[in-house]
Amino acid sequence: MKNVLAILVLIFCATGLYAQDKAEIKWYSFEEATALNQEDSKMLIVDVYTDWCGWCKKMDKETFTDAKVIEYINANFYAVKLDAENNKKTFQFRGNEYTEESMARSMRVSSYPNFVIIDAAMENITQLPGYRTADVFLKDLDATIQRFSN
């Protein structure tokens, strides 16, 4: 019985350590990402979502937990989550005040999920609307970088 208990404790500890070391996308607020972009220029990927969007939750659960997607986004983008219905908190961008809701409207997002790609000069360059599996999302992100990189 002691051996079984010891094995169970080891399995539990190992599982806990694995969960702690699991890679995740580093999500920033819009203002954090723009500040980081001034220090080290990268494109931004803005995940425009709503709380009621089932496809947004599916992206979070399946696509954004894929190891290759995590690695690719963290290496090539500053990732931002933007709630298209949040009008509580305000932030400054290019001399104007926005909420997440008003920023989503100014980006002309009308469906969810929607991924707005902003270049290092802070210009919206394209949108990738709709749910995507990890493989398709990686292809689309890579094609976007290839198309818009110097």
Image: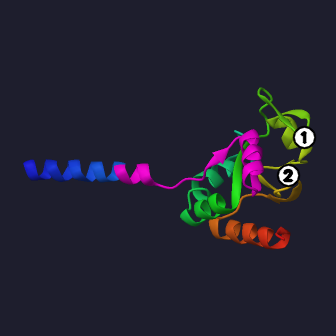
Locate the C terminus by quadrant. Answer: bottom right
CA distance separating discs 2 and 1: 9 Å
Instruction: Identify which amino acid the numbered label 1 is placed on.
Output: Arg
Q: Position of residue 40 (x, y in %)?
A: 72, 54
Label 2: element kind = loop
First in residue order: circle 2 vs circle 1? 1
Q: Which mark is residue 18?
A: none
Q: Is residue 26 above or below residue 136?
A: above
Among all residues in the image, which is located at the extreme top?
A: 88
Q: Where's residue 147, x and y in %?
A: 84, 72
In magenta segment, residue 42: yes
Mark 2 packing: few (<14 Cα in 10 Å), some, or many (20+)?
A: some
Q: Which disc is residue 94 wearing?
A: 1
Q: Which residue lies under the disc numbered 2?
A: 122
Amino acid type at mark 2: Met
Residue at 13 percent across and 52 percent down: it is: 4
Pick whichever, 145 or 94, lies toward us: 94
Could you tell me residue 32's position as x and y percent? 71, 41
- Left or right, residue 146 beside residue 124: left
Looking at the image, can residue 1 be seen? no
Q: Is residue 125 left or right of residue 25?
A: right
Residue toward you, 109 or 30? 30
Q: Which residue is pictured at 86% across the width and 33% down the height?
A: 98
At 75% from the left and 42% from the top, the residue drawn is 30
In this rendering, would 82 be left or right of 61?
Answer: right
